[in-house]
């Protein structure tokens, strides 16, 4: 510990030559106290209530345990073997991956497009933004309950279709196992597009107006400006959004649980609802924990690859700017 | 549908203010219609009777009835749940902001051994969904005697909100120019003085952003309250709404009324915070 070198990062460039040595050394010790004094509360709460429970889940995953009594029946990787050889769980993984992909390919472009359009002086812009963000602030539970009512057979959505002459498209939106996955994806998009648009608009505000003016004076069209100036400058925001979206899609629970419960016939099962249904509700906490660990490992692989190949640049960029 | 409209606007781009504007309003209107019509439907549905809804799901209230809303607003559970949700959200938000800004500050502005490891540790938290940790958490909260207690959800919520908070705040705090720190030092401010008098005020918009995110997350939380708080008379609003919808599943209009009213606090709060969050997310410190 005594070997640790602590210097205020930002002070390095200017502090240098004039400072006498002894003073600088005391500086270091005080920095050390300050660094860990500041970081400790967050670190303690985070480790105690996030890391430790996750670790415990990993331990439980190697036991046949119903949540009561001591952990005694160690069964090695049996829980993992059981999960990964269950077609329903494989379907759950497939559903999660499909939602990851669909979100990136559909929600992303739509959000960017809408944000580009709205990022200009518009009458009532604040109102428009507020209304578009409405779904994001509703809880998944409330949104799911709302859509359960709206999408029920002969409900208002079917009535709406009929009234515009599309009555033939009517489906059992939540009960037909071939349709329900798309229904779920639609409701999820409804819920989360607002957040994506909000992020993109925020990113766009960081793009200086002068760039647009300069480009416009040079005769660039609106689309050329977006294509060659705005979207590249929006890169970091898009990459952060994609990361959040991926991780969220892998961990999907509340919405599915309330809207469909993972059904019908497991058509909308996700890893998290599988864990709830086949692990905890049946009192198989060891098995459920193994599913949780697999869910975590899949998220981890995604995140590490993404961070290594995509986000790294942004982080380094931020360091460079800060210094 | 919006995806196809974007290029359309682009083609007219040279005369963007002549042609673009109406198209933009059209897209905006379509977006708004899609996003808020379900909400409007619920609000209006609450003014009908279940009989009316069963007869024609998409009709106007005839006559308008306020009994559903009155029933919800005079039920004790609703107010208890509203207060519980508020307490949990306020304390979660305050805790996250305080702990988050302290940790993010040293991660952003100090070089020290273990800094990257610390940041990575917090970043890794994004990968731990509550679902992974929820059973051990339940056991721990039970061991602490906090079952049925709001602190039993507040503390874990603070812990689970810290990763996002720190990830958002670090770039904010890093962007505060080094010159300001030097100037503060020359003016005789210590490290703490710099932190409280310069960093915290300058990071204000960032703090608002993470605060709003934490507030919304807490307000909307479902799984943890479900396990920790239990029965509806001690629960928070989402849980209460779900319980109400199950209890009165045959009385559609009443469920709509309850769902509508439980949306209102979040809608009002977010409408007020909306301007701040947008400016907050953009990167607070400019010059």
Image (spheres, coloured by chain):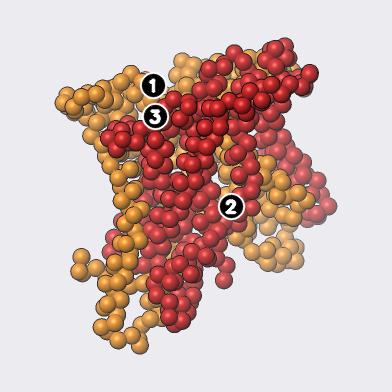
Chain colours: A orange, B red
- Camera-nearest residue between A145 and A219: A145
Please give the label number shown on residue B257: none
Tags 3 and 2 both on a single chain: yes
Mark nearest the camera among 3 and 2 is 3
Q: Residues within 10 Å of mark 2 (few under 14, many from 20)?
A: many
Name the residue tied to disc 1.
A277
Chain ID, mark 3: B
> What residue would you read off at disc 2?
B277
Mark 2 falls within which chain? B
Secondary structure beneath label 2: helix
* Residue at position x 59%, y 39% in the image: B266
- Mark 3 element type: helix
Image point 79% across, 18% down: which residue?
A: B62
Q: Both on one chain, marks 3 and 1?
A: no
Residue B234 appears in view: yes
Q: Position of residue A72 (x, y in %)?
A: 16, 26
- How far across and down, in percent of the image, does residue A171 sit? 63, 16
Q: Quadrant of the C terminus of chain A?
A: bottom left
Residue at (33, 43) in percent of width and height: A49
* Front-lying residue, B157 or B154: B154
Instruction: Provide the chain ID for the residue under circle 1.
Output: A
Label 1 – label 2 distance at C-alpha: 37 Å
Residue B227 marker? 3
């Amino acid at each position: 510990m005594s070997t640790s070198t602590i210097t205020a990062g930002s002070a390095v460039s200017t502090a240098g030559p004039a400072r006498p040595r002894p003073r600088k050394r005391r500086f270091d010790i005080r920095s050390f106290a300050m660094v860990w004094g500041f970081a400790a509360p967050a670190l303690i709460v985070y480790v105690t209530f996030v890391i430790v429970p996750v670790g415990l889940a990993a331990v439980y995953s190697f036991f046949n345990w119903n949540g009561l009594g001591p952990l005694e029946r160690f069964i090695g990787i049996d829980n993992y073997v059981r999960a990964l050889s269950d077609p329903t769980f494989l379907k759950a993984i497939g559903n999660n991956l499909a939602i990851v992909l669909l979100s990136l390919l559909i929600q992303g472009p739509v959000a960017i497009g809408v944000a580009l359009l709205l990022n200009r002086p518009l009458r009532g812009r604040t109102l428009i933004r507020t209304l578009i963000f409405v779904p994001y602030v509703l809880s998944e539970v409330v949104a799911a309950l709302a859509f359960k009512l709206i999408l029920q057979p002969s409900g208002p959505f079917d009535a709406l279709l009929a009234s515009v002459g599309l009555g033939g498209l009517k489906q059992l939106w939540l009960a037909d196992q071939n349709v329900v996955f798309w229904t779920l994806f639609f409701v999820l998009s409804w819920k989360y597009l607002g957040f994506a648009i909000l992020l993109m608009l925020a990113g766009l505000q960081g793009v200086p107006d002068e760039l647009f003016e300069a480009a416009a004076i040079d005769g660039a069209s609106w689309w050329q400006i977006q294509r060659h100036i705005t979207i590249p400058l929006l890169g970091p925001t898009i990459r952060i959004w994609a990361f959040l979206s991926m991780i969220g899609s892998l961990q999907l629970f509340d919405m599915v649980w309330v809207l469909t419960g993972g059904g019908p016939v497991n058509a909308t099962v996700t890893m998290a609802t599988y864990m709830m249904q086949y692990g905890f509700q049946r009192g198989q906490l060891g098995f459920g924990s193994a599913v949780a660990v697999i869910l975590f490992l899949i998220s981890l692989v995604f995140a590490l690859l993404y961070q290594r190949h995509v986000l790294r640049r942004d982080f380094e960029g931020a360091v460079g700017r800060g210094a | 549908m919006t995806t196809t409209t974007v290029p359309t606007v682009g083609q007219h781009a040279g005369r963007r203010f002549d042609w673009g504007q109406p198209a933009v309003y059209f897209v905006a209107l379509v977006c708004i219609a899609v996003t808020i019509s379900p909400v409007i439907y619920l609000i209006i549905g609450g003014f009908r009777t279940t009989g009316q809804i069963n007869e024609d799901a998409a009709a106007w209230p005839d006559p308008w009835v306020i009994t559903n809303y009155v029933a919800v607003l005079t039920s004790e559970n609703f107010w208890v749940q509203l207060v519980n949700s508020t307490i949990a959200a306020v304390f979660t938000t305050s805790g996250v902001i305080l702990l988050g800004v302290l940790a993010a500050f040293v991660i952003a502005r100090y070089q020290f051994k273990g800094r990257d490891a610390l940041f990575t540790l917090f970043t890794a938290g994004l990968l731990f969904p509550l679902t992974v940790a929820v059973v051990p958490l339940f056991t721990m909260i039970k061991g602490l005697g906090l079952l049925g207690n709001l602190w039993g959800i507040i503390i874990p919520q603070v812990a689970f909100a810290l990763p996002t908070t720190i990830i958002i705040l670090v770039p904010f705090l890093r962007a505060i120019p080094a010159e300001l720190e030097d100037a503060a030092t020359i003016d005789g401010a210590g490290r703490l003085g710099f932190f409280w008098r310069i960093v915290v005020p300058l990071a204000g918009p960032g703090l608002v952003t993470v605060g709003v995110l934490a507030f919304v997350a807490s307000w909307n939380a479902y799984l943890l309250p479900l396990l920790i708080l239990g029965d509806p008379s001690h629960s928070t609003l989402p849980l209460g709404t779900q319980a109400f919808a199950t209890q009165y599943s045959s009385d559609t209009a009443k469920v709509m009324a309850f769902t509508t009213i439980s949306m209102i606090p979040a809608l009002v709060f977010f409408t007020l915070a909306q301007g701040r969050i947008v400016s907050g997310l953009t990167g607070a410190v400019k010059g």
